[in-house]
Amino acid sequence: MNIQAPRGTYDVLPDQSAKWQEVEQKINNLCRLYQYKEIRTPIFEHTELFQRGVGDTTDIVQKEMYTFQDRGNRSLTLRPEGTASVVRSYVENKLFGMPDQPVKLFYTGPMFRYERPQAGRTRQFVQFGVEAIGSKDPAIDAEVISLAMEVYRSVGLKQLRLVINSLGDTESRVAHKKALIHHFQPSINEFCSDCQIRLEKNPLRILDCKVDRDHPLMATAPSLADYLNTESQAYFDKVQAYLSSMDIEFVVDPNLVRGLDYYNHTAFEIMSDAEGFGAITTLAGGGRYNGLVEDLGGPESPGIGFAMSIERLLLALEMEKIEIGQSNNLEVYVVAMDEKTKKKAFSVVRDLRMNGISADMDFTDRKVKAQMKSADRKGAGFVIVIGETELESGKIALKEMATGEQQEVAFEEIATAILKKKSLGNRHVKNALLWGS
């Protein structure tokens, strides 16, 4: 039997993993600059967490979750998103008692949703997300949005579009809900079965329906913007002002509702406008979720966050023809002339690694010519050849591949010589950047 990866999953092979590593490194660096700390939660949780946290009227809960019974007959679910797990941890570990609020957290890890696989959208995917819990200041909304935008800018993406909206507070949403029910109810039998269920539970979700999005009533549905009370509009105005103060361009879209039940006030999405990206252009989405902490058993702790798929980020890079993760960091390749010199070569490789120098050698007993070709394929910065002459003299010829320059070095000074050359090379690069040469 030829066993393959399950549908909707994939392997990240070595020639692609460097891209992932570069993206993750940039994310970690940005989170450090913004003072967001990493949190790691379980890959599976009690099913009730997502039913209560995400909302039982959402497509995620109704159609997409991987749920199973464990041996203790408990219902568990592979996490389909990150916010509910982070908030559960915030409550369970009493992070609301920390002296500095908001608590600013980030996570990166696999999520699972049963949906039709397509480009940049798989059943197991890696999600990076941020949660800032414990503040109702509109400035933190703007900071979270700016961090999301900065992730894409840090990898070179330019064809981006930020779309924002306000979903209002509870009072505004209740008024809008009544208007939506009144609007859709006379013709609700023309809508899909999901929308018929949503009418009473959460009619706002009808506006996010993919099946009935072309129905004429969608275009004439009451806009939430018309039902924002004074407080909600003032809050949204402040968010926009903070974004403008950072020169972050945005578009206000009153039809943006997001797909999760816990959102209120600020909602946003970041789109790719790159040619060929496809019909689904959303790269990241998020918003404010005041009330979610209370729903999961904690005290009043307003929060805001976002999540982005790393796969879709990489797809956007591909569409904009941006290459990352291309640098080869093999610094030294050590060639052994024969079996007799292999032991010394092995010792040299280890010594280089212990000095923080990337080094490799042959492990298939190939001839010298084949080993040299391997060093070239791997992009080695330096090559060392060890034969009987080198063993007897205690010295080797350190060859710099880019220039062909060779330097005679004693075995015990190889690491020092390479580190010195690296230091000089870095100094030349800095000078070239400084003087524009």
Image (cartoon, rainbow, N blue to C red):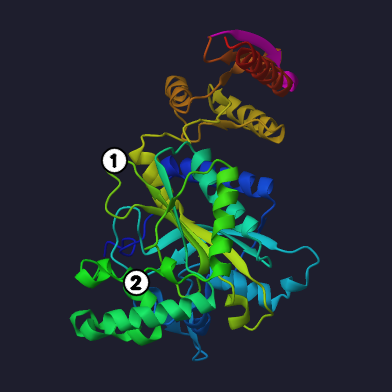
Give whichever of 353, 412 is nearer the camera: 353
Quarter-of-image position of residue 244: top right
Q: From the viewer's side, name the closer residue of 124 and 169.
A: 169
Q: Is residue 54 visible?
A: no
Q: Position of residue 27 (x, y in %)?
A: 57, 47
Q: Is residue 343 left or right of residue 22?
A: right
Which residue is drawn at the image coordinates 55% and 29% (left, top)? 330
Question: Can the viewer see residue 225 in this picture?
Answer: yes
Q: Which mark is drawn over residue 275?
A: 1
CA separation in Å, label 1 and label 2:
33 Å
Q: From which residue to which does the magenta span run?
A: 404-413
Q: Residue at x 33, y 40 (%)?
A: 319
Q: Tell me if residue 21 is in the magenta stretch.
A: no
The amino acid pointed to by label 2 is Pro
* Drawn side of residue 140 relative to residue 244, left or right: right
Q: Secondary structure at mark 1?
A: loop
Q: Quadrant of the N terminus?
A: bottom left
Was residue 409 drawn as part of the magenta stretch in this picture?
yes
At which x and y percent is residue 34? 67, 49
Seen from the viewer's position, the closer of residues 197 and 341 is: 197
Label 2: how many Cα within 10 Å (few below 14, some 14–19, many 20+): many
Q: Is residue 96 left or right of residue 171?
A: right
Q: Amino acid at mark 1?
A: Glu
> SS at mark 2?
loop
What residue would you read off at disc 2?
Answer: 222
**Which residue is rendered at x = 44% and y = 28% of the image?**
366
The earlier-in-sequence mark between 1 and 2 is 2
Q: Quadrant of residue 66?
A: bottom left
Establish if 114 lies above or below 415.
below
Q: Position of residue 36 (x, y in %)?
A: 67, 55
As displayed, is residue 91 above or below residue 343? below
